[in-house]
Amino acid sequence: MYMTNYAVNTTASMSFKVGQNLSTNSNKEIETSKQNQFMGYKLDKDGYFTSEFNKAAGIPENIKIHSSTMENFIKAQTNGSMQSYTNIDIAKTIGNVYKIVSQLIEKSPELKGKDSFSKEDLANYFPQTYLIDKNTLEVKQTFSYDAMKEIVAKGGFKNLGSNEELNPSFFDFNNTDENSELLPFNPDILHSAGNTALSWNTNADKYTNSDGSITMGGLLIGFLSNNVNAGVTPKPLIAGETTIWGKLQGLDSSLNENEVKRLNDRLSNTYFSNLSDAFALLNNTSDVEEFENKLNILNQKDKTSSSNFLEWVQKITDEYQKSLFQILKQPNKTEKIYQLININIMA
């Protein structure tokens, strides 16, 4: 799995990325001054992207993605104190989703060739879990819910290859505790991520047919909305330029694990007068050399009224007596976390 999330190593095994966000500068790109365009891509009269967007994403022309969905997605990634991206390429992001979803459909004979999917189709035939090559992104094998239950009952998977990874098709916050029972995914995929603090409005009506089935575009958006902040794909679904916070979470493919670990270590031992200053640095810096130079300056200052980054993060988890992962399983908790970020732990 691609995540080397800083908080995984420091705060009770978080297993997802918190608030993958854009910087303030990128908001200038999110303009709809022209009714028929969004982020540089043309829209049809109903607000769906035209074939220009599909070509950039590498998806078939008949797949319809609505601009309001992507606007909500961008806003959701912008709204927070922990920003992982300075900009997001929405076309390449949808393309990343399609690369996986299209293979899952191809390996499901009952779904292959369909352009709409009922909840029964998804519940009965869409894979519960898939085995994928982390390097090539080739889906090698898929597993139904019943097959997964049988495998788990026998002790789980054995002898996975070093390049192989087993991932759920739709991440479920209710199925993440160590002792939790394996649950089938919720086939209402355009709403199933709507009860967590990391969710965003998919505008499900834009992908729902009169008979209640969803379009292929809806299937892609459902996969994105359930998995984008969960770290359950071999590579990040979001395509874009990362901040230092994003790099610390393993979202920059140009940095290897050792380089990410070195940055984590540098941050862990750097003292800040408050946590908001730390996140301002993480959110607003993209260049590694610039980041390290700023850390050097901070470490030359008087530390008597400061705490290192690890101590600041621990403040949040101590406040709730649970991990950030458990906190974010509940809606409306992020505002409290952002308030905690601004608390001076030395006060």
Image (cartoon, rainbow, N blue to C red):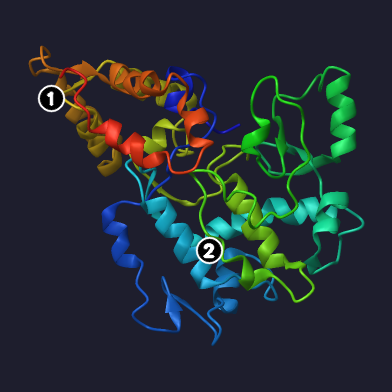
SS for callout 1:
helix
Task: Provide the residue designation for mark 1.
Answer: 297
178 and 160: which is toward the camera: 178
Q: Looking at the picture, how far across and down is residue 60, in whole percent?
A: 69, 70
Task: Provide the residue designation for mark 2.
Answer: 91
Residue visible at 86% across and 61% down in the picture: 112
Q: Is residue 115 visible?
A: yes
Quick one: label 2, few (<14), some, or many (20+) residues within 10 Å? Answer: many
Residue farthest toward the top in the current orientation of the protein: 304
Q: In this view, does 67 lie to the left or right of 312?
A: right
Split into 4 quadrants, where in the image is the N terminus? top right
Quick one: label 1, few (<14), some, or many (20+) residues within 10 Å? Answer: few
Q: Is residue 339 left or right of residue 133?
A: left
Residue farthest toward the bottom in the current orientation of the protein: 45
CA distance separating discs 2 and 1: 39 Å
SS for callout 2:
helix
Q: Looking at the picture, how far across and down is residue 236, in whole percent?
A: 54, 43
Residue 39 picture quarter: bottom left
The amino acid type of the residue labelled 2 equals: Ala
Split into 4 quadrants, where in the image is the C terminus? top left
Reading the chain from its start, which is encountered first: label 2 or label 1?
A: 2
Q: Looking at the picture, how far across and down is residue 146, in whole percent?
A: 89, 36
Residue visible at 92% across and 55% down in the picture: 109
Residue 333 picture quarter: top left
Residue visible at 47% across and 23% down in the picture: 323
The amino acid type of the residue labelled 1 equals: Ile
Q: In this view, does 24 lie to the left or right of 137?
A: left
Q: What is the total number of numbered labels drawn onto the structure image?
A: 2
Q: Looking at the picture, how far across and down is residue 65, in whole percent?
A: 60, 70
Whether 115 is drawn above or below 136: the answer is below
Q: Is residue 58 left or right of residue 74?
A: right
